[in-house]
Image: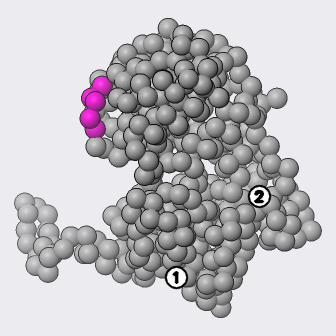
Amino acid sequence: VQLCQLGEAACLVVPDSLTALQRAAAYWRQQHEVRVIGITGSVGKTISKEYIAAVLRQRYRTLKSEGSYNNEIGLPLTLLHVTGLTERVVLEMGMYDRGEIAQLAGIAAPQIGVVTNVGPTHLERLGTIERVARAKAELPQALPPAAEGGVAILNADDERVRAMAGTRRGKLLLFGRDPGCDFTVEDVASGWPERLSFRVRSGDSTTSVRTLLVGTHWVSSVAAAIAASAACGIPVDSSAQALERVPPFTARMQPVVLPSGAVVVRDEETGSPDTFNAMLKVLRESRARRRILVISDLSDSRAKQRKRQKELGSIAAEMADVAVFVSDHGHHAVRRALEAGMDPSNCHHIPDLAKAADFLKSELGDGDLVFVKGRSTDHLSRIVFAQYGSIGCWTTSCRIHRVCDVCDLLKPGFDLDQTLSTAARFLPSPN
């Protein structure tokens, strides 16, 4: 390591900047007496992180991962923001391969570890869902013993997660629908325009929980937040009160009202198979004048592109009144939808996103429910934003892995944050 001067700033020159960042973060974390909560899972970990942090902030000075800062760079950067005033740190832990969560846990040294589920993500690298499970199990295995404050919080509804109980270190807390759980979920309901609600039973008490989330698939993430907060000393009823005010996370089943009066559910942050299945369940249970799908493609799938598009065509024919396929290969989806009996006047292939946005402006009306779904790299957010006004980016090839909301290239001709905030306030009220 060398110290050098760059203008007025002092700089350290290191052989490997990533290793230096991780070591600095691990050192900095060890200098502070904070309780760290680590969260992993194939889906739902971001919502769990947001909900845990929202509850903990009612009592503790809490730091959390921003956005999806959950990898070997984002996690260390988050830890470097710990101060002497920080009391709790909530960290999302992502992975692509085995060993990566163990590495993140080695840096963060969490005392509490939450595993939401194991699903068919990252199969292109890991090959089987069993290997995905082993990779996720690295978090509970990294926890300290119960005597040192270690607590493993596992989703009992997922058999692969529940099996981690036999290998974990630390105290065990289970959440799920099984009556034997420490936090048992009951009476789960959500059918648009209703939002997620359920009851949670812990010990001799039962608490009603109401959220602003769309879909029953979020119940595991919310139950995980309740369990993790309880492990930090917050009663279930206090958690439930805090959770009622937490909004949906950006582009993850996030409903907003368009100028046309239609409601669009933004779900373009990820296109993994699990999230598609969750979207379909919401669509199936929703009440709306028309159900409209705007779809690009699946991610985390080993199927060839033509097969993926045909699958989307079959889904649209079964679930939607109108479908707009925006992938370059969407003609395969259209062909399959038509074969399945979909009306040709309601089935469209519009690969140009700007033209797709214009089509929706003329097509949508009050009472329509629109799902915008695809891979993060397709940046379908722009179709939604263009309903409110002009935007400055319609590039067809973008490698930026983040939602367009925070991208400097978007250049909207209106105040995007204010517009979306206002749109959220005019959502239909649950009955």
The percent position of residue 214, horizontal first and vertical second, equals 67, 39
* Residue wearing tag 2: 238
Residue at 88% in and 70% down: 203
Image quadrant where residue 106 sits: bottom left
Q: Give the x, y percent position of residue 119.
A: 56, 59
Q: Which residues are magenta?
A: 394-398
Spatial separation of the CA atoms under disc 1 and disc 2: 29 Å
What residue is disc 1 on? 142
Q: 359 and 27: which one is in front?
A: 359
Vertical placement of residue 186 versus 324, above or below: below
Q: Nearer the viewer, residue 157 or 395?
A: 157
- Tell me if residue 303 can be seen: yes
| Colour scheme employed for the rendering of this structure | one colour
Q: Amino acid at mark 1?
A: Ala
Mark closest to the chain's N terminus, 1 or 2: 1
Which residue is painted at 50% across and 8% down in the image?
Answer: 362
Q: Which residue appears at 77% of the width and 31% of the height?
A: 430
Q: In the image, is residue 146 part of the stretch drawn in magenta?
A: no
Secondary element under disc 1, as helix, strand or loop, is helix
